[in-house]
Amino acid sequence: MAHIGLVLKTRAENLLSLWIHIMAEQQEEDSKVNSPPPPPPFLEVICKSLGKTSRFAAGTKAGFAVSLINRKLDVGAPFVLHIEAVKDGEEPISFGPDAVLVDYGNDWKLQTFTVLDYGGVRQAEHFQRIPKQSSDGSRPAKTATNPGISFLYMAKILVAFVLLFVLGASFTLALENLPRLILFINSFM
């Protein structure tokens, strides 16, 4: 009898270990089937101005993405200021020019933020444009700036010319009268 009990105990242990092994394999298969797909090797940014989606490689800096999007804009379209990650019911996450774009998954979408989102073109004068970057994204590209010429600037230039002519006229008069001044001083000596 002891022998039958030992055989039954061994068989029960074998069945239990087999059942545990089968359950572990089934759990492993379920985790493979139910696991989320790997993220794509690119990020999609929804551009409201263009009405299109732009794709960028993972690791792209936000400033470079903004400069590329702004180059594609039509004349008169509002400039893109920065990129935000948005989700319904959540506070948006803004990416600065040196921040690397990241996909937060779970209904988060990357979208552009334009001048009009601040309430109009008039307020756009207060924002500094993000500098364009070189194609490799390492440094800002040099661009020619076109400063506005204001009335005050022109008035300052005009005043400078007037003062220059007044100073020149006074030196001319002084040099013309220098011989008379020397004779006048010598007459007293």
Image (cartoon, rainbow, N blue to C red):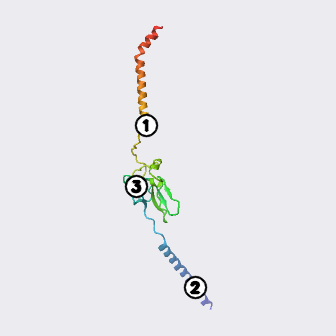
Outermost residue to the right: 2
Total label count? 3
Q: Residue furthest bottom?
A: 1
Q: Earlier in the sequence, mark 3 or mark 1?
A: 3
Who is closer to the viewer here, 140 or 81? 81
Q: Amino acid at mark 3?
A: Ile
Residue that numbered label 3 is attached to: 69
Which residue is drawn at the image coordinates 53% and 79% (left, top)? Answer: 23
- Structural crowding at the residue carrying mark 2, measured as other residues with C-alpha within 10 Å and reported as few (<14), some (14–19) or many (≥20): few
The amino acid pointed to by label 1 is Tyr
Q: Position of residue 25 (x, y in %)?
A: 50, 77
Helix, strand or loop status at disc 2:
helix
The image quadrant that residue 66 belongs to is: bottom left
Above or below, 151 against 118 in this view is: above
The label on residue 153 is: 1
Residue type at tag 2: Ala
Provide the secondary structure element on which disc 3 rests.
Answer: helix
User: Who's the residue at 58% across and 83% down the image?
Assistant: 13
Residue 81 seen in this snapshot: no
Q: Is residue 155 visible?
A: yes
Dot 2 or dot 3: first in sequence order is: 2
Q: Which residue is mark 2?
A: 12
Q: Position of residue 74 (x, y in %)?
A: 37, 54
Q: SS at mark 1?
A: helix
Residues marked 3 and 1 touching at CB (< 8 Å) = no
